[in-house]
Image (cartoon, rainbow, N blue to C red):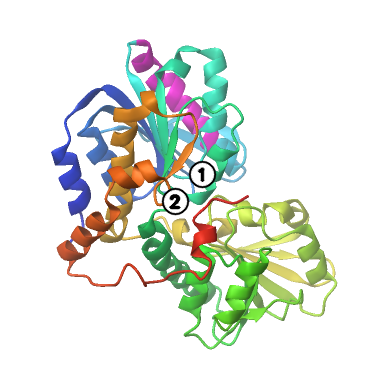
């Protein structure tokens, strides 16, 4: 059993020389595999400071050999910690807490390294750092010269990089690598469905014989649909892109007509606000009395458009769910507080070490590529999988072949879990 190792990543780490002039800000989930990745990164870079995004209330391991910033949720407050010791308490939301942690790490830890002449590389999952960096550059202009680039792990984070009007460093993203698009999406979907079943069971419910609405039929949405296809459920799909919506119909799923059926489970898969105020109003004026909301994407973004209205309701908390009761007798059950289902359980990693190994390996290769090439790169976003220069320097097929051989796996990369509109989805859309 390969519980606590990442053979691909470890080999790449061993093959690279020490980058003594570069420090890393690593922003990722508060999970054991993220801690392990940070430990490996520290073997190559001069220093690594880890910021844990507070999707859950897991604490950082006490024997961590790197500086950590994380937060735990307590009522309306987040308790911000450095190396498990409280720094401050803030009444704020999830996103503000995350940004505060990043700001603390940059100003209290990494500023001194930058002042001493070190270069700064950012590795992250989620696109949280841009506002903090822009603010810090105004306060400490030395950061602008020191930052050599950022590596992004997710679609949401990559979108954030595209939206920067004053991006002052190159960004390289793995969000559209073939492993992420085809293989990781498959495993993420399975974990989302597993957690959906578990959380429904916690509240004495089940998913069988329910109707399910998937908002978004992109890379994750389609993988979830295919995973759910084996259950005794009716799957509806709503996607604003006509071609992608048609792909869902060709795959055998139903086009959603705007009606919320009784006890319908709504899964947001877009990475942007997907469940709108209009959708909530449609449900409230309809005939059904209860729906469930669940997210497969990042932050709490899928349902943020209706949080203000939900907050005005009477709330009942049961296990991992919050039930909001409206005055007309209708209820909305929000699973995992609207956070991604697969990140919510503090006692479990979203993916096993074996499954995340290729992703972290690709991230590491992009990090080294930035270190070696940032001076000749434009200040824009590059996608592994569609950018020719990255593809020429990082042999993903060879990497995945080695991964399969090490783990005794087999699948056909050319045909496995290929989205009918993959060419369109290989670009990051808004």
x, y percent for residue 86:
44, 31
x, y percent for residue 354:
25, 60
Q: Nearer the viewer, residue 375 or 1?
A: 375
x, y percent for residue 314:
74, 60
Q: Which residue is mark 1?
A: 157
132 vs 301: above or below:
above
Label 1 secondary element: helix
Q: Quadrant of residue 118?
A: top left
x, y percent for residue 22:
30, 24
Q: Nearer the viewer, residue 43 or 97?
A: 43
Q: Magenta span covers which residues?
A: 98-115
Identify which residue is drawn at 44% across, 51% down. 175
Q: Within 10 Å of the Cα at label 2, are there few (<14), some (14-19), or many (20+) other Cα atoms?
A: many
Q: Which residue is mark 2?
A: 175
Is 96 inside the magenta-drawn segment?
Answer: no
Label 2 secondary element: loop
Contact between labelled residues 2 and 1, with CB atoms less than 8 Å apart: yes
């Amino acid at each position: 059993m390969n519980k606590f190792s990442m053979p691909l990543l470890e080999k790449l780490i061993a093959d690279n020389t020490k980058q003594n002039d570069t420090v890393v800000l690593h922003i990722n989930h508060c999970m054991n595999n993220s801690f392990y990745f940070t430990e490996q990164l520290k073997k190559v870079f001069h220093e690594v400071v880890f910021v844990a995004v507070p999707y859950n209330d897991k604490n950082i391991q006490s024997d961590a050999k790197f500086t950590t910033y994380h937060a735990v949720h307590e009522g309306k407050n987040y308790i911000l910690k450095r190396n498990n010791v409280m720094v401050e308490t803030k009444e704020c939301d999830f996103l503000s807490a995350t940004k505060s942690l990043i700001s603390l790490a940059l100003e209290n830890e990494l500023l001194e390294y930058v002042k001493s002449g070190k270069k700064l590389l950012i590795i992250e999952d989620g696109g949280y750092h841009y506002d903090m960096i822009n603010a810090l550059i105004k306060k400490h202009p030395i950061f602008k010269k020191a930052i050599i680039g950022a590596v992004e792990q997710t679609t949401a984070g990559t979108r954030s990089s595209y939206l920067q009007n004053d991006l002052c460093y190159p960004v390289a993203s793995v969000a559209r690598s073939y492993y992420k698009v085809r293989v990781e999406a498959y495993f993420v979907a399975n974990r989302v469905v597993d957690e959906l079943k578990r959380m429904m069971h916690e509240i004495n419910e089940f998913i069988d014989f329910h109707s399910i609405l998937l908002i978004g039929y992109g890379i994750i949405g389609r993988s979830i649909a295919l995973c759910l296809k084996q259950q005794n459920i009716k799957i509806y799909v709503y996607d604003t892109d006509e071609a992608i919506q048609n792909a869902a119909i060709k795959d055998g799923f139903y086009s959603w007509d705007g009606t919320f059926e009784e006890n319908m489970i709504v899964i947001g898969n877009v990475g942007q606000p997907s469940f709108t105020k209009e959708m909530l109003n449609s449900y409230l004026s309809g005939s059904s009395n209860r729906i469930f909301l669940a997210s497969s994407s990042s932050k709490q973004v899928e349902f943020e458009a209706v949080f203000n209205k939900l907050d005005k309701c009477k709330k009942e908390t049961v296990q991992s769910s919050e039930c909001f009761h409206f005055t007309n007798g209708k209820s909305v059950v929000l699973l995992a507080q609207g956070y991604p289902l697969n990140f919510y359980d503090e006692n479990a990693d979203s993916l096993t070490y074996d499954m995340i190994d290729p992703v972290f390996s690709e991230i590491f290769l992009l990090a080294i590529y930035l270190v070696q090439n940032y001076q000749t790169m434009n200040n824009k976003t590059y996608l592994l999988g569609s950018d020719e220069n990255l593809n020429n320097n990082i042999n993903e097929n060879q990497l995945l072949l080695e991964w399969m051989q090490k783990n005794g796996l087999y699948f056909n990369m050319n045909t496995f879990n290929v989205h009918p509109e993959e060419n369109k989805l290989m670009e990051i859309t808004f």
